[in-house]
Image (cartoon, grey):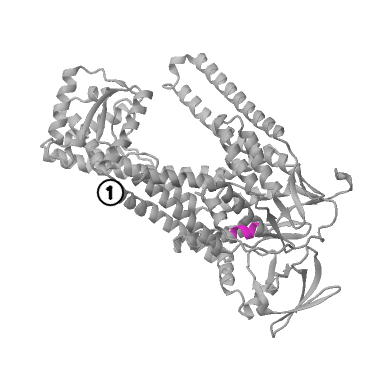
Amino acid sequence: MEPNLAAMREHRIEFTGTGKEYFGIWIVNILLTILTLGVYSAWAKVRNRKYFYNNTWLDGSPFDYLASPVAILKGWLIAAAVFIVYTLTADFAPAISLIILAFIILVTPWVVVRAMRFNLINTAYRNVRFSFRKNYQDSNKVFLGWMFVSMLTLGMAFPYYYYRQKKFALDNASFSQDCFSLDAIGREFYLLFFKALGVTVLFFIVLFGSFFGIGFGVGLSDIGSDTIGATAGVITNILVYLFIIFMVAYFNVRVNNLIWNNVSLGQHRFRSVMRVWPMFIIYFTNLLAIVFTLGLMIPWAKVRTARYRLHHTSMLTAHNLDAYVTERMQEQNALGDQLGEAFDIEIGL
Amino acid sequence: MAISGQFYDGMTSARHAVEIKLTESGMIAIKGAEFTRNYRVTDVADAQRLGGRVRILRFRDNASLETDAVEAIDSYLDQHSIGRTHAALHKLERSLKYVAMAAVFTVAIAWLFLTWGVPAIAKVAAFSLPVETQDSLGEGTLEVFDQYFMEPSQLDEARRQSIRIRFTDLIEGLEEQSRYRLEFRDSEDLGANAFALPSGTIVVTDDLVELAEDPHEIDAVLAHEIGHVHYRHSLRGALQSSATAVLLALMSGDIASMSSFASALPTLILTLSYTRDFEREADDYARQLMQQKGIPLHHFANMLRRLSESHGVDDTETGFLDSHPAPGERIQSFL
């Protein structure tokens, strides 16, 4: 049943974090992590995330993050142990390290489910926790099946694999009795990847075209030795860097919009209206600020990026959000969560 | 004292606007439109303090209370000694003085560790790695260089042979003497240059051989490169820059891809400063070796002067970003 969009109420998401406030949390996190030789990092992670969640408001209520740092630390230690055993055996007993590697690949679907579940179970809105179904069958299909297809087709199937990842993450997520669902189809992801590829090819054609244009103008032999050649080289470098930033902004914004404009939660819908150029400006100025303060502006950069993203996302509600009922709470372990993080599987809502 | 807030019973997402009374004796009385709930302050299971916008108290029965009366809640919990650790953390995080101290302290620790700790660890690691591992590291590098910017040497065989003999004399009696190998290459990109690979292979370009006006000057360059091999500089350099990159990423937290891109710059600066230390160490080694073999030191100074001229470097200029110490300073140390 297609919900009637006109009858829905739009709630813009608000973000109230500030760079100044977050700087204090961030720097104390780093200091305590150093002083405790890394042990505090689990507490740091919770405080970081809780700060961002507590400052994200939907319809007058903030989100909350409830993970236990000890659970995260345990998972982190297990992940670190697996990694150390793997690196050690890689030198001394390659056969064993291959078995460990195969084991890591095979447990990936399980780890992904655990990681997503841990994050969602520990995310609450109005004191009701989100949830994530333990759908290992689909997880195997996506994170083993489609991953191998993507590799075997030399990336031709990658956009579809990427789409299945996102779909898996959303279709198994729920808030109380309502399930999330991603209605976008693989074709739209292909279109997005092709556009990105097209823009990239066009950029390099124009770049090299103009570069050789200059080259012929001053005589090819001068390039590289002569100042005009050197200047052209510097300009080319700058343009390529700017282009990389642009493409990151382009991809993040378009994927985000595509996903959130096609997500439903029960009868509710979402809207994402981020734009590429403002995001590019944000990324670019973030980069300059971070580089010139040797990292001290990272908190400011994170806060303003989050603010832009969240302020351009809204929820279209079909009915008020009061009627969600808490499910039975299950004990969670953080193992999957931290394995997910140690091997950098970026997942999230 | 009465404040207002929102109450959630932990069963449903219904939001109840409530009045909250905090009593001296440790009672939290919550009064909604259709209900009242009384908690003791000891029923508070979680009361993390983050930022100044909102406080969420979570009770043992999973109900929660949310209010923007941040100061009232904080001082009430302080009075009853609830959540002391979080209170202390919060105090650290929002005090300008402590945050500034934390920033200075963090930067100082990071700087000390990166300038002293990382090189020391890399040194131990490089010297405990078996020689065979290092040999295998060098082979790939030479192949790549050969493919992209080096050609076979154009020097005549007699000339090469005479340099080889000098090289053999130079390494005569050194530890791990069998590791050292000399290769000649022609390269337009590198110009007059020489470099050492972890395996002990030392590569000299044709331009460098042409540039030298006295055979002892080539000895000086070879002695410097032998120093790099002796101290395992290329392996240490590789270990140090990867360790630095990982550490910076860890320290700055779960930063997005754009900012890890940005941490490349500090890594680069540190790497260049590590390289400068290596150059000094190799110079010192060359000085000792030349003295031992009875080669006058001024040949090193002369060669260095010629090299910096051929690369168009002003010998007084030294930059933060230079990979070698200022040539003038290096030349001085050999005079």
Residue at the farthest front position: A137
- Is residue A24 found inside the magenta-colored segment of the image? no
Which is more toward the observer, A213 or A58?
Answer: A58
Vertical placement of residue B334 versus A128, above or below: above
**Percent of width and height locating residue B328:** 28, 38
Q: Position of residue B252 (x, y in %)?
A: 51, 52
Q: Position of residue B269 (x, y in %)?
A: 42, 44
Q: Which residue is mark 1?
A: B128
Residue B78's quadrant in the figure? bottom right
Q: Which residue is more in the foreground, B280 or A84?
A: A84
Write the start and end of the magenta stretch as one range.
Answer: A47-52
Query: Relative to A113, is B304 on the left or the right?
Result: left
Residue at the spot x=59%, y=61% of the render? A47
Q: Quadrant of residue B232?
A: top left
In front: B259, or A154? A154
Dominant SS type (magenta): helix
The chain that hosts pointer 1 is B
Q: What percent of the width, then of the height, locates residue B239? A: 36, 45
Q: Is residue A50 magenta?
A: yes
Element marked by disc 1? helix
User: How packed is label 1: few (under 14 Cα within 10 Å), some, or many (20 or more)?
Assistant: few
Q: Is residue B87 above or below residue A312?
A: below
What's under tag 1, amino acid-wise?
Answer: Ser
Q: Can residue B270 be seen in the rendering of this structure? A: no
